Amino acid sequence: MNQYRTERPLPALFGDLTRDTVDLIRNEIELGRAEISQKVSQAQTGVSSIAIGAAVAMAGLVILLLAAVNALAIVLPPLYAPWLAPLIVGGVVALIGYMMLRSGQSRLTADKLVPQRTLNSLRADRAVVQEKATSSDRSVVDDRTVVKTRVVEETT
């Protein structure tokens, strides 16, 4: 830390500040890309779940409805069996399919796709830059750059 306390010309300090700011922005962009890539992967998983849920619901509708309707028709009074059995079985299968679709849809909500780590990091960077603008201690920016580098390496 004391190495920055030496007398250095003002243009050199501004050059260091500019270089550190550019490096910080690059690191933020890399972190954002890594996190957005992860969120896209989560979205693909959600879409896959919806598609699979829809296919399962359709297969269930085709196969189970026929068997369930015929089985329920045996139990119901002959007068009501032709219309009530398909209504009951169809309602139950449609409810199951709806629950599966809602499960996949819940994985696609906007709050789950927001890159939270990047936003938190940007807020911290803003605070560091504001603090740096009022302070002559360069170690704060250097420590933040080291942390950014570690975060980017961990996410990739």
Image (tube, grey):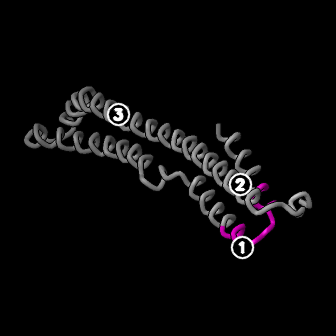
- Disc 3, SS: helix
Q: Earlier in the sequence, mark 1 or mark 3?
A: 3
Q: Which residues are magenta?
A: 130-143
Quick one: label 1 or label 2, which is nearer the N terminus? Answer: 2
Given residues 107 and 1, the one toward you in this image is 1
Nearer mark to the viewer, of 1 and 3: 1
Q: What residue is drawn where x is 18% and y is 39%?
A: 85
Disc on res. 15: 2
Query: Where does the image place residue 72, in percent across and percent down from the top left?
Result: 22, 36
Q: Quadrant of residue 96?
A: top left
- What's the amino acid at mark 2? Gly
Q: Residue at x 20, y 30 (%)?
A: 70
Q: Amino acid at mark 3?
A: Ala
Q: Quadrant of residue 9?
A: bottom right
Q: Nearer the viewer, mark 2 or mark 3?
A: 2
Q: Which residue is mark 1?
A: 134
Percent x, y of residue 17: 70, 57
**Front-most of 61 and 142?**
142
Q: Residue at x 42, y 53 (%)?
A: 110
Q: Does the residue at mark 2 contact the one at mark 3 (Cβ under 8 Å)?
A: no
Q: Secondary structure at mark 1?
A: helix
